[in-house]
Image (cartoon, rainbow, N blue to C red):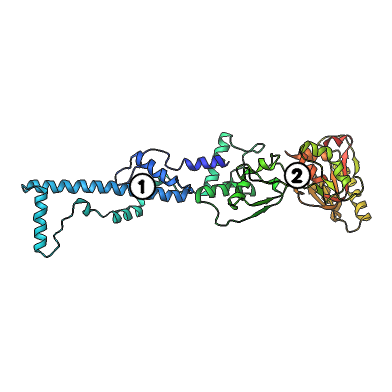
C-alpha cells in the first residue's frame, strides 16, 4: 500500500508535457516544466509543499519569458522610431539624454531591460488565479483522505494490491473510516503534507508482534532517531502478522541496527501449562524455545464435550451447560478468583448467558495481553478454524491463566493443540 500511495502521488507531480497557461501568458515548454519539477522534488518535500516550490519556479520561468518578450518588443519599437526619424538608436538616445539634462534630470537613458519590473510581474503571476488553476492541471493540491479513497477504489477495481489474506475494504466514503485505515491515512498525510509535527526521542512498543508494516512506518515517522524498545512474542501474533523475526519486522525501519534480548523466564503461567503448549509452539514458532516457568501448579484438565472433532459443535446448549458447571466449580473452590472463558467468536453470546457474572467470556482474538487466575478454553478446533492465524490465537488463549487451565474439547480434538 505504501508503494501504491506513493505512485498515486508521483502521477500528480508534473509527469510530463508543457504547461498551457491562460490568457496572453506564454506557454512553458516541456523542458522548462521538467526543470521546475526537478527543483521541486529535489529536497524530498511532501507533495503539497513541493507544489509551492514547483509553482515558484514556474512563475520565475514565466517572468523570464515575459521579460524576454518585453525587451524584444521595446527594442523593436526603438528601431522603428529611429528609422522613421532617419537616425540610429544610439544617436536618438544621446539626443534624449541631452534633452533630459536640459530639463534638470540626470540624463541617463536606460536600455529596454530597465523598462521591465520583474518583481512586480512575479508578484502578479503568483497571485493570478488563472495561472494557479493551470498549475493544478500538472501538479494539483491533494488531500490525504481523497488519496486513500482513490487507491482503495483502484485496488477494488483491479483486484490488486491487497495484503495477503485480506480483501479490499468497503468504500470508506460510504462506511466511514476504521482503525484499520489509520496507517493508510497516516502514510497519505506524510506523502501529501509532510511528517507529523510531534516526534519523540525514544518510543516503547508493547505487543509489537501485532504491528503491520504500515503501522511500523507510522511509528518510525514519530521516532526519527529510531531509538525504540520493542517488546513482543511472534507466537502470539494475530492474523495480520506474517513475519517470524524482528529483523524481518523492522526491515526498512532499523536495518542492521537492532539488538535482541530473548526473555527465557515466564512469570505469569505455570510450568505445567507451558508444557502442555510445547507441540503447538513448535508449529507456530519453530525457532522459539519454550520459556522456563518460575512456578508450578496443577496440570491442565480436559473436559470432553459431546460430539466428534470438527469446527461445528454438537448441541451448543449442552456445551454451554458443561462449561457453566466447570466455571461454577472453579469459583466455588477459589472464591474471588478471576475466571475467563475463551472461545471462538460464534460462541461468545451463548456462553456469556450460561455463565452469567461468574466469568468473563471473550473471543480468542481479543485476549492478547490479558491474564486470569483460571481459564476455560472451549473448542480449540473452532478457535483454530475461526480466522487466519487461528493457531496463534489458540496459543494465546492457552497461556492466559496464572494458575489453572481447563480445555473443553470434543473427543479426538487434541490434534488442534
Which residue: 60% across, 49% down?
220
Decide which of 261, 296 is in the foreground and name it: 261
Marks 2 and 1: CB-CB under 8 Å? no
- For residue 250, which quarter of the picture? top right
Query: In this view, which residue lies farthest toward the bottom?
Result: 104
Which residue: 58% across, 43% down?
171
Residue 74 placement (x, y as % from top left): 18, 49
Name the residue that disc number 2 marks.
236
Quarter of the image for the C terminus: give it: top right
Disc 2 on helix, strand or loop? helix
Q: Is residue 137 visible?
A: no
Residue 394 placement (x, y as % from top left): 80, 42
Name the residue that disc number 1 marks.
58
Which residue: 12% across, 65% down?
104
Q: What crowding class fits label 1: few (fewer than 14 Cα within 10 Å), some (14-19), or many (20 or more)?
A: many
Residue 135 placement (x, y as % from top left): 39, 46
Disc 1 on helix, strand or loop? helix
Q: What crowding class fits label 2: few (fewer than 14 Cα within 10 Å), some (14-19), or many (20 or more)?
A: many
Q: Is residue 364 visible?
A: yes
Query: In this view, which residue lies farthest toward the left?
Result: 86
Amino acid at each position: 500500500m505504501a508503494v501504491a500511495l506513493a505512485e498515486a502521488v508521483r502521477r500528480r507531480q508534473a509527469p510530463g508535457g508543457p504547461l498551457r497557461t491562460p490568457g496572453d501568458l506564454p506557454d512553458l515548454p516541456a523542458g522548462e516544466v521538467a526543470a521546475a519539477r526537478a527543483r521541486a522534488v529535489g529536497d524530498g518535500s511532501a507533495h503539497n509543499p513541493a507544489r509551492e516550490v514547483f509553482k515558484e519556479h514556474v512563475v520565475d520561468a514565466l517572468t523570464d519569458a515575459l521579460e524576454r518578450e518585453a525587451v524584444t518588443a521595446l527594442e523593436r519599437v526603438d528601431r522603428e522610431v529611429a528609422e522613421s526619424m532617419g537616425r540610429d538608436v544610439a544617436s536618438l538616445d544621446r539626443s534624449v539624454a541631452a534633452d533630459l539634462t536640459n530639463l534638470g534630470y540626470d540624463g541617463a537613458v536606460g536600455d529596454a531591460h530597465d523598462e521591465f519590473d520583474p518583481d512586480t510581474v512575479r508578484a502578479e503571476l503568483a497571485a493570478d488565479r488563472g495561472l494557479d488553476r493551470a498549475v493544478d492541471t500538472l501538479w494539483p493540491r491533494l488531500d490525504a483522505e481523497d488519496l486513500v479513497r482513490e487507491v482503495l477504489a483502484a485496488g477494488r477495481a483491479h483486484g490488486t494490491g491487497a495484503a495477503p489474506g485480506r480483501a479490499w475494504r468497503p468504500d470508506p466514503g460510504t462506511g466511514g473510516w476504521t482503525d484499520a485505515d489509520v496507517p493508510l491515512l497516516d502514510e497519505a498525510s506524510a506523502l501529501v503534507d509532510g511528517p507529523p509535527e510531534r516526534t519523540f526521542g525514544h518510543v516503547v512498543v508493547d505487543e509489537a508482534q501485532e504491528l503491520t508494516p504500515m503501522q511500523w512506518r507510522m511509528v518510525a515517522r514519530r521516532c526519527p532517531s529510531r531509538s525504540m524498545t520493542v517488546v513482543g512474542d511472534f507466537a502470539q501474533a494475530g492474523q495480520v502478522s506474517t513475519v517470524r523475526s524482528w529483523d524481518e519486522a523492522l526491515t526498512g525501519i532499523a536495518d542492521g541496527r537492532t539488538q535482541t534480548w530473548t526473555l527465557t523466564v515466564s512469570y505469569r503461567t505455570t510450568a505445567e501449562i507451558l508444557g502442555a503448549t510445547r507441540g503447538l509452539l513448535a508449529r507456530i514458532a519453530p525457532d522459539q524455545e519454550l520459556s522456563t516457568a518460575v512456578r508450578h501448579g496443577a496440570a491442565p484438565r480436559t473436559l470432553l464435550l459431546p460430539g466428534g472433532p470438527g469446527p461445528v459443535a454438537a448441541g451448543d446448549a449442552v456445551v454451554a451447560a458443561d462449561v457453566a458447571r466447570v466455571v461454577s466449580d472453579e469459583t466455588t473452590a477459589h472464591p474471588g478468583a478471576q475466571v475467563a472463558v475463551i472461545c471462538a467468536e460464534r460462541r461468545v453470546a451463548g456462553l456469556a448467558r450460561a455463565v452469567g457474572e461468574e466469568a468473563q467470556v471473550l473471543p480468542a482474538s481479543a485476549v492478547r495481553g490479558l491474564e486470569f487466575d483460571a481459564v476455560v478454553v472451549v473448542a480449540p478446533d473452532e478457535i483454530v478454524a475461526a480466522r487466519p492465524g487461528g493457531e496463534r490465537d489458540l496459543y494465546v488463549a492457552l497461556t492466559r491463566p496464572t494458575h489453572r487451565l481447563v480445555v473443553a474439547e470434543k473427543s479426538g480434538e487434541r490434534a488442534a493443540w
